[in-house]
Image: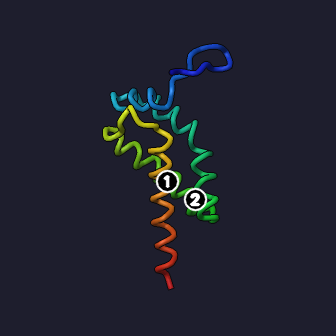
Amino acid sequence: MSQADPDGAPRPTDEELMVRCQTGDAQAFSDLYSRYRLPISRYAGRILGDGDAVDDVMQETFLRAYSARDRFLPDRRFSAWLYTIAHNLCANELRRREAQP
């Protein structure tokens, strides 16, 4: 179900935007990026603490989401799917740090 913007216009859900993205609507993915850029950065920052790595994880999260857009299942929550990608990238970064001498 769509929510309303402050001006009363219907606001598409994340899942609706992702379905539009799957059909080639680049603006839909841009809208998702705008909604989730800061939340994903904050999430990665709580896990990693380092600014450069946080930026890298945030960017890679969206690159991977876009690359895998055809595998997104619209009956699932987009936010859970995106945060799973971010979490896995954070875990990879922490493993990489532990492996460095």
- Residue 82 in the image: state x and y as whole percent: 47, 45
Q: Which residue does the image show at 50% across and 41% down from the upper left?
A: 79
In the displayed structure, would residue 97 be above or below residue 26? below
- Residue 97 in the image: state x and y as whole percent: 51, 75
- Residue 54 in the image: state x and y as whole percent: 58, 59
Mark sitting on residue 54: 2
Mark 1, secondary structure of its residue: helix
Q: Which amino acid does label 2 sit on?
A: Val
Disc nearest the viewer among 1 and 2: 1
- Residue 74 in the image: state x and y as whole percent: 38, 32
Q: Label 1 to label 2, Cα distance in Å?
A: 10 Å
Q: Which residue lies furthest to the front in this view?
A: 75
Mark 2, secondary structure of its residue: helix
Q: Which amino acid does label 1 sit on?
A: Ala
Q: Name the residue under label 1.
A: 86
Q: Which residue does the image show at 44% across and 26% down from the upper left?
A: 16
